[in-house]
Amino acid sequence: MSVEKIDTLVVGGGQAGLAMSEHLSQAGVPHIVVERHRIAERWRSERWDSLVANGPAWHDRFPGLAFSDVDRNVGPDDFAPKETVADYFVAYAKKISAPIRCGVEVLKVERRIGRPGFRVETSTGVIEANSVVAATGSFQRPVVPELVPRQARVVQMHSTGYRNPAQLPEGAILVVGSGSSGTQIAEELLQSRRRVYLSIGPHDRPPRAYRGRDYCWWLGVLGKWDAAAREPGKEHVTIAVSGVRGGHTIDFRRLAARGMILVGRTEAYADGAISFAFDLVDNLERGDLNLRSLLDEADTYVVRNGLDLPEEAEARAVGPDSDCITNPISVLDLAKTGITTIIWATGFVADYSWIELDIFNEDGRPRHQRGVSAEPGMYFLGLPWQSRRGSSFIWGVWHDAKYLADQIATQRKYIDYHLATRGSRPQLR
């Protein structure tokens, strides 16, 4: 079998892989990008029909291309539809002439013995590389709790399998998860006149906009996007935010007033019934506290900088509690309540089973410093809080990719010096 040799192999053709490719090219590092499906495939085939980006188009993009250059109907303050987001990445790959190969799946990465670099088995052959960048991110394998048995008389799906209300059988729906995905899906189902139960856990609930500025702007000027990486195990915080219908602040009390039935965190299943923790009120209050805290910081910023931004007292208004809040439901009998579908909006976990290197913690997370792993030459990109709060966002991953490209280019210089003093050149370049 012939073996292809390249300096750097980037695994993943989404936002992380393309950002990595751009910076590697600028650094003069020979590389290829392999993607097992299409560019930005998850945006096309693993998201619901009405999904839009959670950040406005002026903010959630790469510096070198505006969304309006891809879709003239998307203005700077609009939230791009999922198909436009996918088209954006395809256009960006073309713009930077990314050396990307689609339809190539990486099966195994292992360290070469007695020589530098890695041996990579793919679905189309073997590649040897000095450096490998895992740009697949952490949102790879959907998490579905082993709670409700498959033989239960209820349709179960992860949020990646949901497309629209019409695909679901008649009856009520339980959505488990109060992050952006769960909340947006639950609200869409409510608008389609379905009976909806929403299981809410601990979450942050920022304002969509305040005093005429989107919350992405506020996080930027307040320095929150650049907050240092959190300690291991505390990287992920569920955030309820939406760009649907031009963007609006998620308010669970208003959803309850419109007919959505809120319950606490899903805990157990037995004899056809699901039980919930008695934490609904605490979780709602935590979300309210998060919102008020950001509003307070924004008001302070306005005064300190003398900005002419209109006051917005109604942003702090708290509506009355519906019966499901004052009298929380602890148990739901699926048959008696007519629940025929459970949608698990319970997130994802990383899957690096194809990397056969001793660089992972017991929970499967890579040991790294800003994406530089414990194994020389192995890098990770697109991780939440990789270097800052914004690392897993489109613009954030672009900055992290620049750092990794600099690291790879620096290592090449050291190796080049070593080989030059020995009168030879590296075989992989």
Image: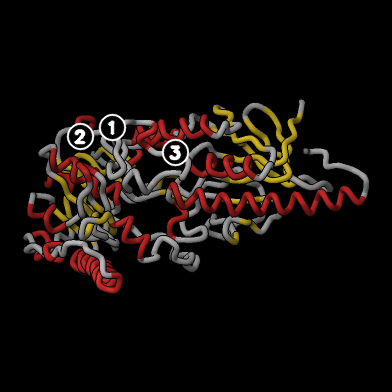
Query: Upstream in the sequence, badge 2 or badge 1?
Result: 1
Q: CA distance from mark 2 to mark 1?
A: 26 Å
Point 12% across, 46% down: residue: 337
Nearest to the observer: residue 34 or residue 86: 86
Q: Residue 132's image quarter?
A: top right
Colour setting: secondary structure
Identify residue type, mark 1.
Asn
Q: Nearer the viewer, residue 87 or 141?
A: 87
- Frontmost of labels 2 and 1 is 1
Q: Earlier in the sequence, mark 2 or mark 3?
A: 3
- Note whether 300 is above or below 418 in the view shown: below
Q: Nearer the viewer, mark 2 or mark 3?
A: 3
**For mark 1, does the 10 Å Cα neighbourhood hold few (<14), some (14 to 19), or many (20 or more) residues?**
few
Q: Quadrant of residue 286?
A: bottom left
Taking the image as drawn, is residue 409 in sight? yes
- Helix or strand or loop: what does disc 1 sit on? loop
Residue at mark 1: 73
Residue neighbourhood size for the residue with mark 3, other residues' Cα within 10 Å, grouped as few (<14), some (14–19), many (≥20): some
Q: Identify which residue is drawn at 66% across, 55% down.
A: 358
Whether tag 2 and tag 1 are in contact, CB under 8 A, the answer is no
Q: The disc labelled 2 sits on which kind of residue?
A: Pro
Which residue matches tag 2?
A: 165
* Circle number at residue 65: 3
